[in-house]
Structure formats: structure tokens, C-alpha cells
Amino acid sequence: MGNFLNNLGQKLATFMIGRNGVDTLAQWSIGAGIVCLLLDFLFGPLTGLPIFSWLSLAFLIYACFRMYSKNIASRALENARFQAFIRGPQAKMRSLSARYKNRKTTKYLKCPKCGQSLSVPKGKGTLRVTCPKCGTKTTTKS
Ligand SMILES: [Zn+2]
């Protein structure tokens, strides 16, 4: 049995040589496929339309196409474009997540002049804050 699994693993590894494999876009495509599958379970019976089911299938087929594709240069270019596309929203989500996690210890404010996001520790009385970007000084209750 161990030998069989070993051979299977080796065959799979040989099969994947020269292929794109799992990249960010494939991972997101699988995620979108799973989300569509869940939406289909939730709303499919209500609407009677198999649209989420088809979308799910399309995302999963696209993910497979990406993973088994031998045109690695084109897939890498698409993946880089996708990563550039999601970079902004991802950073925003990380920032919001950090703000929520630190909401009891940190007060967040914006620079009145340039809009730069600033943070000060909570419970330290009135603080004088200098914006690191434009140097504007403001006072705030923490
Ligand atoms: Zn500023």
C-alpha cells in the first residue's frame, strides 16, 4: 500500500513537471467556486436557476486549466496582473482587521491636512500628534 501511494505520488509529480501548478489566481478561483457552490445551496432552490452551480463549475474548471496549463509564461503574467489587482483591497482589509483587533488600545484618526491615517494609544489624555507625512501638528483626546 505504501509502495502504491509512493508510486502514485511519483506519477503525479512527473505529471506536474512543466505545468503551472497552484498559483494565487487558481487558489482564488477555487475559493470563488466554493462560494458559488454555497450560494447555489442557499439560493438555488429558491430561484430554481442553476446559475451559481454553473458559475461554480466554471471557476473550478478555470482553476484546473490554470494548474495543468503548460504555458507557464502566460499563466505567470495573468497571475501577476491578478496579484496587482487585489493588492490594494487586500491591504485595506488587513488595515481594517488590525484596527478592529486594536480598537481597545488604539485610537485612529486622520491628519486634517493630508488625510494620512494616524494612530495613538488610548487612555493617555490629550496628545499632541505630528503627522509623519506632512508634519502637521494636531491635538487629540486619546
Ligand atoms: Zn499629514
Image: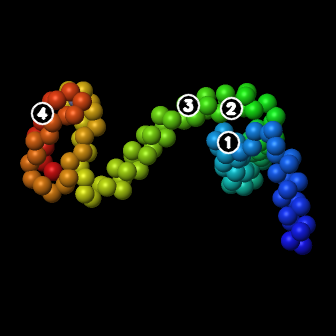
Q: Is mark 1 within 8 Å of ligand 1?
A: no
Residue 32 in view, yes or no: no
Q: What residue would you read off at disc 4?
A: 137
Residue 8, image x, y percentages: 88, 60
Tag shown at residue 76:
2
Identity, as a three-letter code, of the amino acid under mark 4: Lys
Residues at circles 1 and 3 in contact by the CB criterion of under 8 Å? no
Residue shown at the point (68%, 32%) measured from the top left: 76
Q: Residue at x 61, y 31 (%)?
A: 80
Question: Seen in the image, is 116 located left or right of residue 46?
Answer: left
Q: Select label 1 or label 3 by which is in front.
A: 1
The structure residue drawn at horizontal position 13% and vertical position 43%, both measured from the top left corner, is 140
Q: Amino acid at mark 1?
A: Asp
Q: Tag 1 or tag 4, which sits nearer the N-term?
A: 1
Name which of mark 4 and mark 3 comes first in the sequence: 3
Nearer the observer: mark 3 or 2; the answer is 2
